[in-house]
Amino acid sequence: MNYASFTNLPASTKLPAHSVDGSRAVPTDVSRGRLAALLVLAASIEFLLVTLAAYFAAVLYYRLILLYSPDPALYIQESVLIATLEVLVSVGLLSVGFRQHSQNQTQPRHIFLWSGAGGVLLVFSFFISTIFVLKISEDYSRATVIVQTASVLLTVLCTRAIWFSLLQPAIASGLIDARRVILIGEPGHCSQFSAQAMGTGIRTIRSFDFPTIRADSSVPARPGTVRAIPDVRQLVADCRPYRADDIVILISDSEVRSALALASALSELPVDVHAVPVGFIDLMAVSRITQFGNIATMRMFQSPLPRFNRAIKRGFDVAAAIAGLIMTSPLFVIVPLAIKLDSRGPVLFRQTRHGYNNEPIRVLKFRTMTVMEDGHNFRPVVRHDPRVTRLGQLLRRTNIDELPQLFNVLVGDMSIVGPRPHATSQNQLFAELISSFSRRHNVRPGITGWAQVNGYRGETDTLEKMQRRVEHDLYYIDNWSLLLDLKIIIMTLFSRKAYWNAY
């Protein structure tokens, strides 16, 4: 229904709450009541599990490590205190509250888990300070605190992962509270915006046409105020009963000047008021408004890893590379001997590939082929390729041929996890065909990566295969976390997909 049909309704008229597509909207009180019940249930379960985790971690440490049976009631009070602090910090401060909860609709899983891990560390900081101040730390050793911290951390991460997997589908389906939005603009623009927002669980409960903006000469203008406009006043009155969380004004070129007056009038409602230029909906979807000095800018892309995250990732890479070299050191003796016995040629193969910032690097591999192709002479390996040696087939299927790249990690050319580097000839070809291809080089290339563990490795004889690989690489870049790196490493070792198309 267009806004014009509302202008002549009496003030007492009740308007039916329908979404843009005509479906009945879930009442706010019902959906938020469900949310409140779920939050209480989640807090209660977390409190119980954290209490048990903290208590049994301390008791089992004494019994299994120190071979001593402590008083069963010794750690009950401390465990309850830890659980109480955890619920207050993790639930009360970090994730519940209807306002902040709504942000979880588009929050990635790893950020949700990291906030839980940060809450646990904050809890134990409070806990250690409390038992020190109250002088009840006689029965606590450093090992006990460490064991309890690890146990509680694992418990919180597991419960949050389960909670996230249950919460997101419930929000998206409208079973529980979602952000309820009113759209103001042309019907076609409202439908487009509503369809995009629905994917993140944001429900459109009503749409109105952009009102006719005309001056109201009966009300004198005052500095810093906007004149009351009859059509706008009626629109504000029509929006009020819906109790929306947000109002989004979809501005066309002809309505830019009127948008400020409309937004000022809507500011008397207890909602967030947004404005989106209708010609830039897709652009706004990938942009963020940021402060650049004293100027607000629309940031379309950002550096994938801030300096602090780069330092964390680099530290992890060095530690993992050293550990990997120590654990696989026997292979650095056995494999070279086997290569020498299997075929003529050097043990190591160096190939030029593109690394961070698209700069060329020399990647190390155990030689698995009878040729040493590089640069423009490079031809990708295909299934049953006669250039691959008998031993090379085994090394490539098991990824052992990649082990020398641990040295590339140590010197800083590569990372343990990241987009796999391609030969220079492949890079030049696909960079011309796929516009976002070169974004892969915004981080260091990896020995393994998100695309590889999802089965997108090996031959790229079609553009679609490379596009799928690039999509996974960009997902990794935009969603990096240390937990994601650990997940990829584990999948590399144990997932079948990591070995697909390895030939």
Image (cartoon, helix red, strand yellow):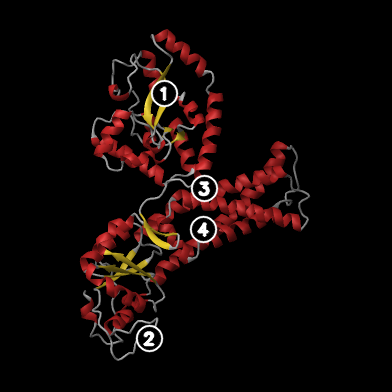
Name the residue carrying label 2. Answer: 222
Numbered badge on residue 140:
none
Q: Quadrant of the C terminus?
A: top left
Q: Is residue 333 left or right of residue 474?
A: right
Numbered badge on residue 398:
1
Image quarter of residue 270: bottom left
Measured along the vertical axis of the image, is residue 33 above or below residue 370? Answer: below
Which element type, helix, strand or loop, lies under badge 1? loop
Q: Is residue 43 left or right of residue 167?
A: right
Measured along the vertical axis of the image, is residue 369 above or below residue 428? Answer: above
**Residue at position x 47%, y 63% from top?**
100
Q: Is residue 6 left or right of residue 353?
A: left
Residue 465, position as x, y percentages in the image = 27, 35
> Depth check: 136 or 321 in front?
321
Image quarter of residue 247: bottom left
Pair 1/2: label in front: 2
Which sits earlier in the primary sequence, circle 3 or circle 2? 3
- Amino acid at circle 1: Thr
Numbered badge on residue 158:
3
Which sits earlier in the primary sequence, circle 1 or circle 3? 3
